[in-house]
Image (spheres, coloured by chain):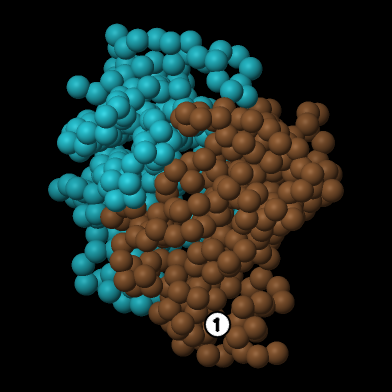
Chain colours: A cyan, B brown
Amino acid sequence: MTTTTAIRHPTRPGSAGICRGCWDQMHMPIPIGGPLSLPLRAFGITRSKMNPDICTICERSFQYVKKQRQITSGATILFADIRNYTGLSERLGAVELSHIVSLFQDCSAGAIWANDGIVNKQMGDGLMAIFNFPISRKDHAAAAIIAALEIQRACAEALSEIDVGEPFGVGVGIHTGDVQIGEFSSFHSDFTAIGGVVNQAARLESQAAPGEILISAETALQAPELVTESEMRMLSLKGIEQPVKARILRAG
Amino acid sequence: MTTTTAIRHPTRPGSAGICRGCWDQMHMPIPIGGPLSLPLRAFGITRSKMNPDICTICERSFQYVKKQRQITSGATILFADIRNYTGLSERLGAVELSHIVSLFQDCSAGAIWANDGIVNKQMGDGLMAIFNFPISRKDHAAAAIIAALEIQRACAEALSEIDVGEPFGVGVGIHTGDVQIGEFSSFHSDFTAIGGVVNQAARLESQAAPGEILISAETALQAPELVTESEMRMLSLKGIEQPVKARILRAG
């Protein structure tokens, strides 16, 4: 195995010896594992919470990495959340609710990291993931779809033991296109992605039933082998004038 | 002026010499301004991005601060976002869109910090703020309402110069009650709040028209002087069985 393949395909999330984001964006080898990483820890450079195979430099120093405040980049955006969570949150106790949220967040992150995505935002019962930045993946649409299938599989297994008296489960929405990546407030230094593509991914997710993955036509076009024979649905999304065509996948 | 009042009421956000969160939660004086703060910076202890008057210990080390994984606490939750943003994001260019998002995030954060709240989550065109943790405020409901009025005022002024050919503006939702505060995934260390109260605040915000502040009956009850003669509206919120009564305020 050459160094390059070792960098690009760690056997499991968190095993990369150098930061894959800094490598893909700057070709700079930043040690995040092994003894070489120890001196950097004194400067706060450690594995990122967004993905353990990238470092806190790519997480918090976007302008240093890209030499500009924001970039436009092709990416795939994935939103996931626990459907019917508002109803659950009205009825469940604090311990049960936080147990469900933790299971969802941990299962989802594992699936996203295994496919080179980053968990960019966690919002209670939901999350937003970016594929193709800072870890580059030409097949980012396929990576996101595979991550979504794995999210559904892992969450269904983890959440199946919990009986709350009504059906609940995870919904996922995925959309691909140009997004703006950068820092969009003067005080928060974590980068994020904004733009129409991000919002449409969120809108798709909001229409997913428990267990469903809603995939935009743009994403499906880049990974046709993963959506063959999947159901097609026309959706009217809030704030978007034209009806949107989506493919629907379910795990298992 | 005694030391205590100097701690509790800094003249402007970011001027506190010791972390107000660590002081309120642990009565521990953590220097975050002046020469005493310099040695701590070497350990990554600096002003928090959530509020410059708290430090990265309260932000990232919830279990150290509270000696448990999560607590149930009375708090007021505020959600704000740019209404009609999905439509805007379909039509505007990257630079214009990110300019609008930055203005919104910066104006809102200033208003929240000035009233001792924290910007717990930023999600593109939206944010979630918590009042009463880690900075304690008995009048957290009133603090959130005053922050919301200031968000509307500051954003209306900042965004008035931007002509995008259709009305847009900020919507705010506020709800008060017991929330679960803690870390709800094994990999992210920033604390957050979850629970029915958080979700209802988000649902209220989703029904606010541009310029409106929707205030739940529970919040209004704790700050009656701020909502006298305000309009009352009955709302049917997604996931919540009973209709919800809300007070409506507008800035100016």
Q: B175 left or right of A22?
A: right
Q: Residue furthest left?
A: A1
Determine which quarter of the picture holds residue B243. Answer: top right
Check the image and report above or below for A71 versus B139. above
Quick check: can you spot residue A126?
A: no
Q: Amino acid at mark 1?
A: Ile
The x and y percentages for residue A67 are: 56, 56
Element on which disc 1 rests: loop
The x and y percentages for residue B11 are: 72, 77
Instruction: Name the residue carrying label 1.
Output: B18
Q: Nearer the viewer, residue B56 or A96?
A: A96
Determine which quarter of the picture holds residue B126. Answer: top right
Q: Nearer the viewer, residue A237 or A17?
A: A237
Q: Identify the residue shown where x is 21% and y is 55%.
A: A15
Q: Identify the residue shown where x is 56% and y is 54%.
A: B76
Q: Identify the residue shown where x is 46% and y is 82%.
A: B27
